[in-house]
Image (cartoon, rainbow, N blue to C red):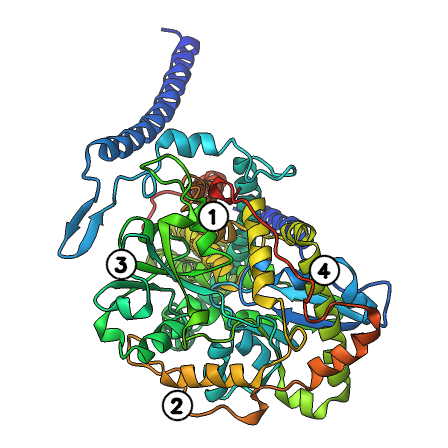
Amino acid sequence: MSSVSLARSTRARRKGTQVKRWLFGLLGLVIVALVWEGYKLLGPADGFVIAGTRVLPRTSDLAMPHVWDMFSRLFEPVTSAATARPLWLEVAIAATLTLGIAAVGWLVGLVVGIGFALIMQRWKPAEWSILPWIILSQTIPLIAFAPVVRSWGSRIEIGAFEWEDWMSVALIASYLAFFPIAVGALKGLHSPDRLHIELMRTYASGWWQTLVKLRLPAAVPYLLPALRLAAASAVVGAIVAEVSTGLQGGIGRLLITYAGQASGDPAKAWAPIFGAIVLGLVAAGSVALLGLILRKYRRSEVTA
Amino acid sequence: MKHSTRRIAAIGAAGLSAALILSACTGTGGETDGNGDGELTEVKLQLQWLPQGQFAGYFAAQDQGYFEDEGLSVEIIPSGGDIVPQDALANGDVDYAIAWVPKVLGSIEAGANVTNIAQIFQRSGTLQVSWADSGIDSVADFEGRKIGSWGFGNEWEIFAAMAEEGLDSSTVEIITQDFNMNAFLSGDIDAAQAMTYNEYAQLLESVNPDTGEQYTEDDFNVISYEDTVGAMLQDAIWADTERLENDEEYQDTTVAFLKAVIKGWIFAAENPEDASAITLAAGSNWGPSHELWMVNETNKLIWPAENGIGFIDEEAFNRTVEAALSAVNETGARLITEEPPATAWTNEYIERAHQELEGEGLDLTGEGFSPIQVTLEEGGN
């Protein structure tokens, strides 16, 4: 076999694997739909109740609308108003706004998280004093935190800059996102072998050079899972903060308003849930893209 | 290794520009500063929930330019799950807030310094809804049944009405309701809490799986708290007590604000369809028939207003206080333990607003008000 045809067949095989992967992904969706409909058809009308707690839902159309109803509802207008957009578009627009806010939160979390990690790596006492606070910060419940952030934000006005409501949401998202990044990055910065660090020292390189040439590249395998975790946290944080502060236009807002319409229009309430799922996938996918760019440094990945 | 540093820098730059683009995209929402006319006084109004027909009068005042006519530039701020209007007011985040009287009485006892300046809703819109064949015709029938409540300060009318019947929370099973009526429709709740303007409509928009048709009013038993001693005053406009006492500009702004709000609610009473459309345009997510129902039912809670819209009836206020004093919820907590201070309410500003509007030929008492008939579509759509 010539080298050309070998390369061609490898490419074809790789393409085949790609197709297979998508097929399996689709198959997964179909199985979920089948399980849903199967349970709805065969499950007890009142669900399963163990010791007064319902562990499996009722099978009524109210609790579990048909898969096709939920799907076809997506392509109907949101309401009967003349200006109403199709439901999927309304959800997509809302999801885009939330994604934007989550992305800003994620980026702020990235800067703050890496900043903390650098400070803690540079000065050992800083690590001792800051790290407990970073961990403690995550124990504050969001519902206590959200009104405070909005209240403070509403008072910020510097020149032409005025704090807007979406910034409160982004700040809360970043508050959740910075944590895994700070912890992951710190672990990554500490990861190079003593051997390599000492080698750098024999080259008479300073902290900065060691950081740029050794520690940062070594931190990448630790950082990538942390970034993925942070992306998921930022999305969840953004959605919860939207609900909590009542921000208009995002997916969190649609979740509660459509939940209020679930008695008369049960299928509608599921649309923003699907939107939130797609949103999470897109966020995680974007980080995977980042991993592709940094693939040179991904020798082995370590879970954060 | 040199090029890798550059690459990292490039990624950083790409990330930064992405952030800037995103912030530019998202930064366009909700700008409401009164540019152009520098003389408008900036006012922030905190609602107690998302934009909906319950607040149609404020959106109408905004849309029809009544606020601007009074020299105000008003930002109407919707609330979310965790924003408490009277707290936002007491913190100085906003200038006025819409909230139910009993909830604020609790906040006042906890130290909030706020004053009721206009009792927009003259009567209570809370219902307890059960199935027509459930045998629950009055509060006394609650005993031993599963009673739905939203909690979070929305439950006090239930407990006050029960207290009058000699019932307390241990004699019923209190079940927390969420955003919709599914728990009631599925039978988890025997009698569910419902507002005339919202959740009751949600029931009438739902399809009866047995008939394939929407439920009708005949399917339900309705207990209105307005007919019980548990009735409490609901949507009122609250202002900052201290600023009312010391800040003359705020006093004038308050009167101007109330004048515009009055005109807004009169507009909603006379043009419910338009008010509903305005509310939808202001960001409400309900379907048009539900929104119109909401505006119409809200109008019924406001009009007629014997002493003029927003006037606080001392007797009704005292009844609310008495009911609040008597209520104990399922956790054994009391809403308030003593009478609120005299600063809790005042008719001074609403009376001034009435006087200033006198010559304008407005129907301030709603003498000529008559509600419309609204047909609810399936799902409220």
Residue B267: image tag: 4
* Residue corresponding to mark 2: B337
Please report whichever mark, 4 or 2, sits nearer to the chain's N-terminal start: 4
Q: Chain of mark 4?
A: B
Residue A258: image tag: 1
Instruction: State the CA–CA distance, disc 1 to disc 3.
Output: 32 Å
Three-letter amino acid code at disc 2?
A: Thr
Identify which residue is drawn at 53% across, 57% down.
Answer: A105
Instruction: State the CA–CA distance, disc 4 to disc 2.
Output: 40 Å
Direction from residue A240 to residue A190 in the image, left or right: left
Q: Of the residues tagged 3 and 2, which is closer to the observer?
A: 3
Residue A297: image tag: none
Instruction: State the CA–CA distance, disc 3 to disc 4.
Output: 41 Å
Q: Of the residues tagged 1 and 4, which is closer to the observer?
A: 4
- The quadrant holding residue B344 is bottom right
Instruction: State the CA–CA distance, disc 1 to disc 4.
Output: 28 Å
Could you say which is closer to the camera, residue B215 or residue B156?
B215
Label 4, secondary structure: give it: helix
Three-letter amino acid code at disc 3?
A: Gly
Label 1, secondary structure: give it: helix
Could you say which is closer to the camera, residue A201 or residue B338?
B338
Determine if marks 1 and 2 fall on one subunit: no
Q: Position of residue A196 (x, y in %)?
A: 38, 55
Please report whichever mark, 3 or 2, sits nearer to the chain's N-terminal start: 3
Label 2, secondary structure: give it: loop
Q: Is residue B51 visible?
A: no
